[in-house]
Image (cartoon, rainbow, N blue to C red):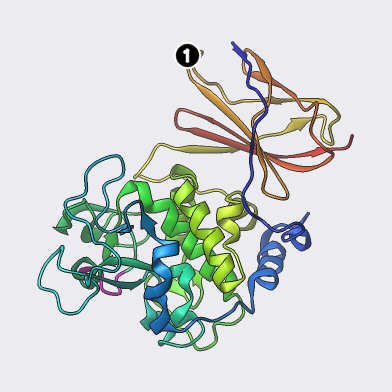
Amino acid sequence: MLLLVTVTRLAAQIPNGYYDPANGKTGVALQAALHNIIKGHTVVSYSGIPGYFPSTDAKPGNVVWDMYSDVPGGTPPYVFHYGSGEECGNYSGEGDCYNREHSWPKSWFNDASPMYSDMFHIYPTDGYVNGRRSNYPYGTVSSASWSSQNGCKLGTCNWPGYSGTVFEPVDEYKGDFARTYFYMSTRYYTEDSGWNTTDMTNKAQLKPWALQMMLHWNNVDPVSAKETSRNNALYGIQHNRNPYIDHPEYAAIIWGNPVGSDESNTIVHNLTVYPNPAGDNCSVTLPEVSSTSEINITLVSATGTKYTISSSMQSNIIELDLHGLSKGIYFLIITSDNVVCQAKVVKIK
């Protein structure tokens, strides 16, 4: 199997040096470093948030990007429009109006500031669906007691470790909410003394069952253009960023990789790179994969630039061509079918 891929760059609008204080750190040290980078954001008023939504959460035509009613790749059952008087108000069913959803329920931090108006976890959503979600944790549902028109579910959790009532968003937005929760756990790291312990959280940190689920969601629903655009817009408003949108690999570097679950057959491996540090070439040995499997290889630099690189494969050994890349730290992500492989690569010349 021969893999020939041209080098491309997918640059997000990350300020130069923004994440430099996090370079080389792992675990709690990395979480603390990211906290120090994104803390002290500009606090907006809660009443002013609807005025920002058209620049942070809009589809073409001034349509509200509502993750509780949207059907990615399909036709939503209904849409709301900004500037059309469709903000709640009263509602009696789906499609009546939209309002502001604290995806991390505000009761979990006792309606306190600055969390109450931190837009990184506040989204425009259908008011009725928002009300049905209430302050239930996110989770996975096998048999729903209620479903929204786009497929969100309310019911008993079947994710290992919790069996209470949960709200499950559609698959295409699970990663969005996972990275939102990682942001909250990091932005308010050590600033959560007045927060509550809930079925999903221990103050600002996720309980083990929820952390494993969110790590899984982060892997299976990658960062979208929607998230990147929103991250950039919110940087212009709050003057901080969600690190897990710019660097989704940070989640595994801090909390590890998700263990297996009944909900998915996704398998995550940590790879060994040889040599590492590397020059212009290095190799990795993959777990056994089918010869017909499509393999995708991405490198992410410490500044957030993503690269695809030229590679060749014989048996389960991949030779990576690092020519043209600057020296520095990169995170290697290889995906194939239901397998995700990750490694850190240090290029020294």
Q: Which quarter of the picture shows residue 341?
A: top right
State the residue in front, 60 or 101. 60
Residue 200: percent from left, percent from top? 40, 69
Most extreme residue toward the left is 92
* Mark 1 crowd level (few <14, some 14–19, many ≥20, 10 Å Cα): few
Tag 1, which secondary structure?
loop
Vertical arrangement, residue 259 with respect to residue 233, above or below: above
Quarter holding the N terminus is top right
Q: Is residue 74 left or right of residue 337?
A: left
Which residue lies under the disc numbered 1? 292
Q: Residue at x 44, y 69 (%)?
A: 121
Specify the amino acid type for callout 1: Thr
Residue 183: percent from left, percent from top? 54, 65
Residue 173: percent from left, percent from top? 37, 52
The magenta segment is 132-136
Q: Which quarter of the picture shows residue 283?
A: top right
Q: Is residue 201 left or right of residue 306?
A: left
In reply to whether residue 156 is colored magenta, the answer given is no
Q: Residue at x 88, y 37 (%)?
A: 348
Q: Residue at x 43, y 45 (%)?
A: 221
Vertical arrangement, residue 58 with respect to residue 190, above or below: above
Q: Which quarter of the picture shows residue 154?
A: bottom left
Q: Is residue 139 left or right of residue 22?
A: left
* Residue 224 visible in the shown view: no
Residue 6: percent from left, percent from top? 65, 23
